[in-house]
Image (tube, rainbow, N blue to C red):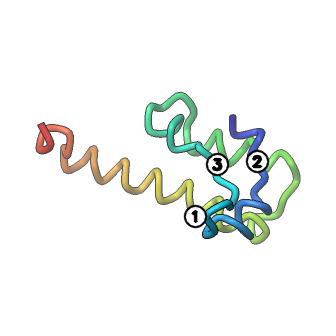
Amino acid sequence: MADKVDPLKYGKTRNYVNGAATFLSLYTSRVVISDLQGQESVSAKRFKIPEMEPFVNELCCYYYFRRVGHVKDLIRQIK
């Protein structure tokens, strides 16, 4: 999953209709993989953090908002 992500392509094209997407939210939201596993998998490709900053920011946003949802018990509120 995360090993198929090209963080450079994602960073350059993510804001375009045909841009690269990671689709990791499907897996991180259900904790199939952790955010850290996603970042480690891409880091293993030897990219520097500044090169893959948009990708790392995406992972941070996933983690942050999932944590906010957990702390505020949003699932209960939605039900």
Q: Quadrant of the N terminus?
A: top right
Instruction: Give the vertical position of 6 relative to 3 (above or below).
Output: below
Is 11 located above or below residue 41 in the figure? below
Closer to the observer: label 3 or label 1? 3
What's the residue at 79%, 62% (across, down)? 8
Which quadrant holds the C terminus?
Answer: top left
Find the distance from the CA under tag 3 to the CA under tag 2.
11 Å
Judge left or right: residue 72 versus residue 27: left
The answer to the question of whether label 1 and label 2 lie on touching residues, with beta carbons closer than 8 A, is no
Q: Residue at x 35, y 49 (%)?
A: 67
Q: What residue appears at the point 82 percent right and 64 percent down from the top-left corner?
A: 48
Residue 42 is labelled as 2
Q: Earlier in the sequence, mark 3 or mark 2?
A: 3
Q: Are marks 3 and 2 in contact (CB under 8 Å)?
A: no
Q: Position of residue 33 (x, y in %)?
A: 57, 33
**x, y percent for residue 28:** 51, 39
Q: Secondary structure at mark 3?
A: loop
Give the residue pinned by disc 3: 22
> How far separated are the C-alphas under marks 3 and 1?
12 Å
Instruction: Determine the CA span between mark 1 and mark 2.
Output: 13 Å
Mark 3, Cα crowd under 10 Å, few <14 / some 14-19 / many 20+, is some
**SS label for mark 1:** helix
Farthest residue, direction top:
32
In the depicted structure, whether residue 1 falls above or below residue 74: above
Q: Position of residue 66 (x, y in %)?
A: 37, 48
**Within 10 Å of the Cα at label 2, are there few (<14), some (14-19), or many (20+) other Cα atoms?**
many
Q: Is residue 64 left or right of residue 41?
A: left
17 w.r.t. 33: above or below: below
Q: How many marks?
A: 3
Viewed as shown, does residue 68 lie left or right of 62? left
Q: Which label number is shown at residue 57?
A: 1
